[in-house]
Amino acid sequence: NSATYFQGIFDGNSENGTTITGLTILDASGYNGLFALVNSATIRDIKISKGYISAVSGSNITVGGIVGYACGTTTITNCSFDGTIATGDSSSSSYNCFGGIVGDTYSQVTIENCQADGTIFGNGTYMGGIVGRNYGTSAQDVTILRCTNEAELRPGSCTAVGGIVGFSEIKGTLKVENCVNNGAITPSSFATNLGGIVGRINGAATAAITSCTNSAALTSGNSANMGGIVG
């Protein structure tokens, strides 16, 4: 339910973390993930193992392995998703967002020390190993620190695909620092923008991508813009 959100602190225990095995969400629509929607939340030390999330065909679908949609002043730390996110047969104009950790962000969001493994595949609009899309209409920042993507990204029709962030359009500062992408990006159809770290950056007041590494192969898939770091 898009009107229901988690707000507060979820602490999975900093010593060993909380592991959830076999998380399964079928025919996802709207916001979906372990947390479908969070608003001004702190989430830390959660591991998803052998997860499976499938999305229906349609528009405005947001899926993340940990959080579907993150807004407000939200921090996500020391979380991981290992599994499969399978998107529906939506066209690239359907405004769908898929990410290994977070599907979509809005406002002041920080993601730190997170990792995605497994596979993300299918059609959508924005797809990222860590975050599908960052979006914002006010001067607030999005910060992604020390995150690693090991998941293979296999987009069908997508506008922007990135090993860490698929697409970013914020009015504040986008900061991506000390992040690594090792997951191959292999479009089966086309992806307009392909980047080893960020697929596309649009409208950020400042964008700083520092000390990031992409070691994975990118296959063009008839992409208009492709780069080892930014598409």
Image (cartoon, rainbow, N blue to C red):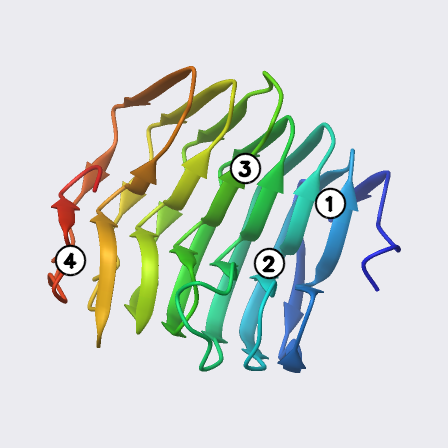
Dot 1 falls on a residue whose secondary structure is loop
Q: Position of residue 188 (x, y in %)?
A: 21, 76
Q: Position of residue 65 (x, y in %)?
A: 57, 62
Label located before the other in sequence (4 or 2): 2
Which residue is denoted by mark 2 in the rendering? 47
Classify mark 3: residues with Cα within 10 Å, few (<14), some (14-19) or many (20+). Answer: many
- Foreground residue among 220 and 131: 220
Which label sits on residue 137? none
Q: Is residue 150 above or below residue 169?
A: below
Q: Which residue is mark 1?
A: 13
Q: Spatial distance from mark 4 to mark 2, Cα to Cα?
A: 33 Å
Snapshot quadrant of residue 58: bottom right
Q: Is residue 229 left or right of residue 82?
A: left
Of circles 4 and 2, the one toward us is 4
For image coordinates 33% across by 52% down, the residue present is 160
Dot placed on the residue nearer the N-terminal end, 2 or 1: 1
Q: How many marks?
A: 4
> Which is more N-terminal, label 3 or label 2?
2
Q: Is residue 207 above or below residue 118?
A: above
Separation of marks 4 and 1 at Cα, in angstroms: 43 Å
Q: Amino acid at mark 1?
A: Asn
Quarter of the image with the C terminus is top left
189 w.r.t. 171: above or below = below
Q: Are marks 4 and 1 in contact (CB under 8 Å)?
A: no
- Please name the residue that numbered disc 4 is placed on: 223
Bin the neighbour count of mark 1 within 10 Å (Cα to Cα): few under 14, some 14-19, many 20 and up.
few
Q: Which residue is mark 3?
A: 135
Q: Amino acid at mark 4?
A: Ser
**Residue at x-position 40% and y-position 63%:** 117
Mark 2 or mark 1, which is nearer to you?
2
